[in-house]
Image (tube, grey):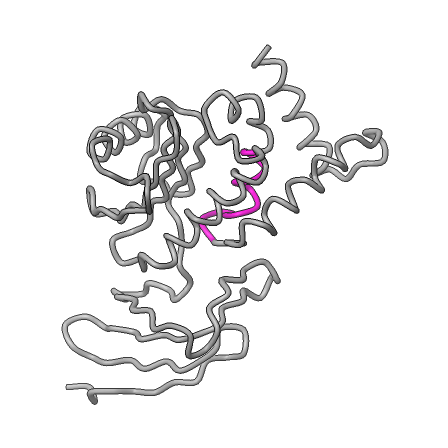
């Protein structure tokens, strides 16, 4: 039987104070400041500031991931969604999941603060504002605090970008900004940023770059410009 505890020092990018205790599951207690090597992830959790518990099964990694981010209206219809998992392989499966999550949470009181629920082996953090419902989904072994930080970052960024007019009409009129917002928060399931002010600042800079001639834009900027023009055309 393995020893009851093993202490391991992580590299500076994924630092510090890792204690692994062996039982039926491996419980990892982590107090850390997490930065991914690509200079993209910053969760702002300084060593000693909090203790996070991850249940690690099999070969699961230490880097937290997000399965999807949903922004629905008060009827459960899509405003903006982004999926990062193959758990829902078809559009019909995604729509069914969105309806299921909406129906299960619509009667809860998630307007004063975010709430958490476990549905179909997924941890879901959600918050309602006006006629908009915000959701962040992770696996059942993900840490709720980290998922909550993603939700809060998304909500704070949207609030800034919509100038505190957080409702469906304003969201649809600025859908291009919300989509860029999602791109700045998560990429391929990996968390890039959770600070709402920084997210909004990056989205705003993309929007300013979009005013430049196409010949002077990078491929990413040109794609964002094309998407913005398409979105505005659809909303007319």
**Residue 141 or residue 163, whichever sits in front:** 163
Q: Quadrant of residue 157?
A: top right
- Is residue 150 left or right of 110 when viewed as pictured? right
Q: Main secondary structure of the magenta part?
A: helix
Direction top: furthest residue: 236
Instruction: Give the percent coordinates (x, y) of residue 80.
Output: 46, 29
Q: Residue at x 33, y 29 (%)?
A: 94
User: Which picture quadrant has residue 91?
Assistant: top left
Task: Please tell me whether residue 12 belongs to the stretch shown in magenta.
Answer: no
* Foreground of the two, 116 or 56: 116
Quarter of image, res 181: top right
Q: Please give left or right for residue 234 compared with residue 46 in the image.
A: right
Please identify the quadrant where the N terminus is shown.
bottom left
Q: Quadrant of the C terminus?
A: top right
For the image shown, how many numbered marks are present on the structure?
0
Q: Residue at x 38, y 26 (%)?
A: 131
Residue 225 in percent (x, y) is at 70, 29
Give residue 191's position: percent from left, percent from top: 48, 54
Front residue of 18/134: it is 134
> Is any part of residue 192 visible from this angle?
no
- Which of the pair 184/116 is nearer the observer? 116
**Percent x, y of residue 46:** 48, 73
Specify the segment rendered in magenta: 178-190
* Residue 29 visible in the displayed image: yes
Say which residue appears at 30% left-offset and 74% top-offset: 28
Rendered position, 170 above or below 45: above
Q: Looking at the picture, does residue 40 appear above or below residue 102?
A: below
Residue at 81% in and 29% down: 214
């Amino acid at each position: 039987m393995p020893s009851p505890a093993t202490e391991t020092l992580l590299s500076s990018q994924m630092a510090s104070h890792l204690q692994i205790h062996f039982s039926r599951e491996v419980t990892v207690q982590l107090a850390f400041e997490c930065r991914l090597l690509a200079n993209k992830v910053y969760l702002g959790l300084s060593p000693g500031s909090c203790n996070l518990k991850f249940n690690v099964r099999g070969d699961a990694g230490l880097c937290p991931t997000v399965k999807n981010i949903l922004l629905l209206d008060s009827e459960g219809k899509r405003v903006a969604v982004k999926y990062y998992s193959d758990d829902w392989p078809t559009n019909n499966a995604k729509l069914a999941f969105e309806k299921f999550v909406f129906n299960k949470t619509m009667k809860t009181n998630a307007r004063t603060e975010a709430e958490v629920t476990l549905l179909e082996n997924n941890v879901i953090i959600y918050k309602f504002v006006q006629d908009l419902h915000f959701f962040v989904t992770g696996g059942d072994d993900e840490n709720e605090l980290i998922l909550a930080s993603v939700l809060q970052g998304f909500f704070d960024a949207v609030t800034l970008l919509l100038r505190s007019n957080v409702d469906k009409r304003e969201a649809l009129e600025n859908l291009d900004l919300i989509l860029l917002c999602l791109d700045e928060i998560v990429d391929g399931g990996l968390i890039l940023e959770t600070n709402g002010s920084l997210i909004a600042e990056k989205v705003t800079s993309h929007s300013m770059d979009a005013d430049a001639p196409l010949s002077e834009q990078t491929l990413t900027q040109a794609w964002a410009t094309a998407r913005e023009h398409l979105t505005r055309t659809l909303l007319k």
